[in-house]
Image (tube, rainbow, N blue to C red):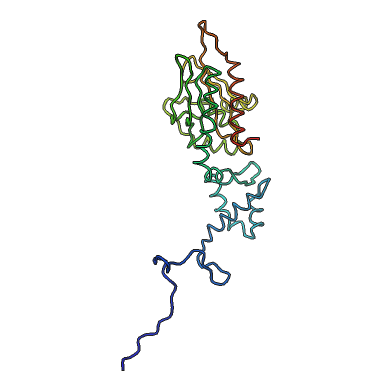
Amino acid sequence: MKAPGPRTTPSKRSTANHGENAPSNQETEGDTPRYNAPALDKGLDILELLSQAQSGLTLNEIAQNLGRSVNEIFRMVVTLERRGYALLDANDRYSLSLKLFELAHKQHFLRSLVASALPLLRELAQRARQSCHLAIYQGGRVVIIAQVDSPERWSFGLKVGVMLGLTDTSSGHVLLAFRDEVERARMLAAHVKVDGELSMDPGELFDILAQVRQQTHATMPSRQIRGVTNVAFPIMGVAGHVIAALNVPYIERIDAQSSPDLEEVKTIVSSIASRISKAMGAS
């Protein structure tokens, strides 16, 4: 008789298998998930908790609500804040940023913004007799995402995809001015200078931003091209969050041809910016 071989017991299926024999990440043994990622669970718990906190939570409050110690969640909360998913205010309270919203809607958001804005940019160019463009903040700089030329014989415009300075342009000032202090500090920390960008004294910059907030728009002589006055208004989105800047690089005509003056152009830009904002969900 042949000697019996060693007795074997059933083993867990290898995660390398494919097809119908491959395990599902949703399998459970009793009430306990077979596959879990404790650190990821902890981070998701924190995000879900912050989404329900209207006034933000301190580190101690987060720990208490989750039934964990501060030591357990400290690194996770700091990482979420560093990556931009959570915001820390002057009172050491954490709140959820709009980064998850931006990630979920990023591609659709840009297409929707440009599609909504372009007909109104064309209307703006016709009414103001000036070129205009739409800009957003991205990676420490300002990026042009849409542009329409003036219907006049000559025009001054910026190409789509061009990157501008964050601190020395009216679009950058609008995008900075209508963010909260934490987001503004993060944007400035991530600031990357573009070619030719002029240095800006921090005190002077903060004074300019305060004036922009008070006036609800930015008007300034171009720091790049002589004879151009930039007029920029914010495009607001859901929850009063600035999502873009609408800019007209105004050029004054001095011949006999009648055209809107600077104050008239400001009124037109303000109206168009409000209509784009409404289309993007601003109340």
Left or right of residue 229, residue 61 in this image: right
Q: Could you tell me how many numbered marks the image carries?
A: 0
Extreme-top residue of the structure: 256
Extreme-left residue of the structure: 1
Whether residue 166 is situated above or below residue 68 in the rendered picture: above
Left or right of residue 132, residue 50 in this image: right
Front residue of this view, candidates 207 and 28: 28
Quadrant, the N terminus: bottom left
Quadrant of res 22: bottom left
Left or right of residue 14, residue 113 in this image: right
| Residue 137 percent location from the top left of the image | 51, 34
Whether residue 48 is situated above or below residue 106 in the rendered picture: below
| Residue 82 percent location from the top left of the image | 53, 46
Whether residue 219 is situated above or below residue 176 in the rendered picture: above
Front residue of this view, candidates 180 and 244: 244
| Residue 29 percent location from the top left of the image | 54, 71
Quadrant of res 220: top right
Quadrant, the C terminus: top right
Extreme-right residue of the structure: 55
| Residue 98 percent location from the top left of the image | 58, 43
Whether residue 241 is situated above or below residue 16 in the rendered picture: above
